[in-house]
Image (spheres, helix red, strand yellow):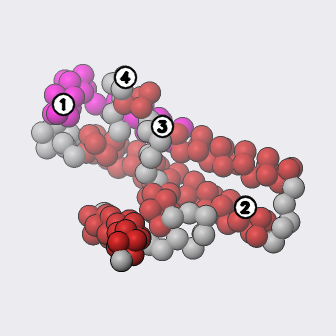
Amino acid sequence: MKNVLIYVFLFLSPLLFFSAYAQKDTIIRRSPVKTLTDAQYNAILKGDDVNNTAASATMNGYPLPDKVLKYKKELNLTPAQLKQFDEIMKTLDLKKREVAVSVIRNEKMLDSMFRRRFVNEGSIVFYGNRYGLYQGELRTALLTACFNTRKVLTPYQLNKFYTLEKP
């Protein structure tokens, strides 16, 4: 009986965690790729920076545009600045979607090759390197968005942003 309870706890804990996560973070889609968990799949679709690849920018005074936009009233962003941020966000969102499609397609191909036993070292190298390329594209898009965000802000707005962002 004790073993049964332990197994039930071990298997239900992750389910409870993910259902709480799903309620907190909009809708979780089911992953059509068996090599990706639902959480991984949704993070890829949203373009989440799970590896904190924008850290070199954000830690050195180049904020992410979505974080700046949270404080648009406090920073007194002008209509011209808001228009520039709209363009930055559109470009970033487009690149995130492109990368998401590419990563998911790549994962499906790897899964298919291994499942059908139609794999060799060359194809592993090829698709493995493509994954790195996609990660690099996402990083470049995030860093570029940070760079462009800083260019839009005045020095006063930038200082005020970091004052507001401090915990």
Q: Nearer the viewer, residue 50 or 92?
A: 50
Q: Is residue 10 above or below residue 1?
A: above
How many neighbours does mark 4 have within 10 angstroms: few (below 14), some (14-19), or many (20 or more)? few
If you read the primary sequence from the N terminus, does the residue marked by circle 1 or circle 3 appear first?
3
Label 1 and label 4: CA atoms lie apart by 14 Å
Quarter of the view holding residue 132: top right
Circle nearer the viewer, 1 or 4: 1
The structure residue drawn at horizontal position 76% and vertical position 70%, both measured from the top left corner, is: 115
- Give the quarter of the figure containing the C terminus: top left
Identify residue type, mark 3.
Thr
Label 2 and label 3: CA atoms lie apart by 24 Å
If you read the primary sequence from the N terminus, does the residue marked by circle 1 or circle 4 appear first?
4
Which dot marks residue 53? 3
The residues colored magenta run 140-167
Q: Nearer the viewer, residue 119 or 108?
A: 119
Circle nearer the viewer, 2 or 1: 2
- Residues at badges 1 and 3 in contact (C-beta under 8 Å)? no
Q: Residue under label 4, please give it.
A: 60
If you read the primary sequence from the N terminus, does the residue marked by circle 4 or circle 2 appear first?
4
Residue 141's x, y, as percent? 51, 42
Identify residue type, mark 1.
Lys
Identify residue type, mark 2.
Leu
